Amino acid sequence: MTTGGMFDLSGKVALVTGATGGIGGSIARALHRQGAMLALSGTRREALETMCAAFPDRCGAFPCNLTDHADADTLIPAVEAAFGRVDILVNNAGITRDGLLIRLSDQDWDDVIALNLTAAFRLTRAAMRGMLKRRYGRIISISSVIGIAGNPGQANYAAAKAGLMGMTRVLAKEVASRSITANCVAPGYIDTPMTSELNEKQVAAIMKDVPSDRLGTPDEVAAAVVYLASDEAAYVTGQTLEVNGGMHM
């Protein structure tokens, strides 16, 4: 644990959604390394508890289905009851339901918007009440290069991720005077279990558009989150930090 140096998060409470995924897990580990207390949320209780066991101090598991409004409404109050407050909210939970727009079902549209955008809105709204009272907070939403550049077959995902960026800019303007920042991190293609399903031909096609000529790592996304969560980023708000190896400029 670091204390007193740059990007020190000692004493801060960070809630990370989608914490059991490749990027979510790296974000959680990076925040913990900087001294934060962790509230980890996801749908898989056992996976969350296993993660928390790796952080014997300063960690709590909060299983939650964010698309179930009644369940989701209990998350922020549960974390506040356990840790006293939420200082840093990382909206990371997300899914894909890909298909060309002409064949995209209403259900696949609704499911992606519900988790990737609406859940982030509702959690942010709930966390904001305590942040406004304390005059401190960090809202960090994980968007995507797809929300900026688009990608055939991902109309629902692109709409949700672009929506996160738009919502974040509005929120930043609304709460900046209370020392609360709102930013997005937009990863490009990152080496996770999701991208490991791509075949060699698909990866080669992607690499043609990536000047760095490699996939990013979850730790590189997590480092961007740590920066935006820190006091060093207090004057950075309403921004989207792109972590994509130059894929989009």
Image (cartoon, rainbow, N blue to C red):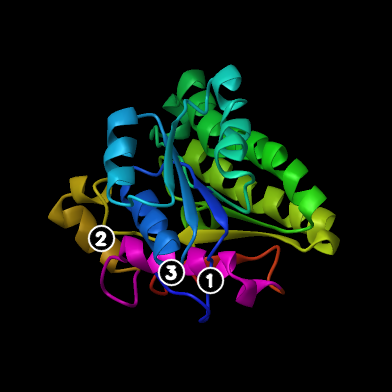
Q: Which residues are magenta?
A: 210-234
Disc number for residue 227: 1
Between 38 and 94, the residue placed more toward the observer is: 38
Looking at marks 3 and 2 on the same chain, the residue that comes earlier in the sequence is marked by: 2
Q: Farthest residue toward the left?
A: 200
* Three-letter code for the amino acid on which mark 1 is drawn: Tyr
Disc 2 from disc 1: Cα separation: 31 Å
Q: Is residue 136 left or right of residue 86?
A: right
Q: Is residue 236 above or below residue 63?
A: below
**Mark 3 and mark 1 in contact (Cβ < 8 Å)?**
yes
Which one is closest to the eye, mark 2 or mark 1? 1
Q: Is residue 233 magenta?
A: yes
The quadrant in which residue 177 appears is bottom right
Q: Is residue 191 magenta?
A: no
The quadrant in which residue 246 appears is bottom left
**Quick one: SS at disc 1?**
helix
Disc number for residue 205: 2
Looking at marks 2 and 1 on the same chain, the residue that comes earlier in the sequence is marked by: 2
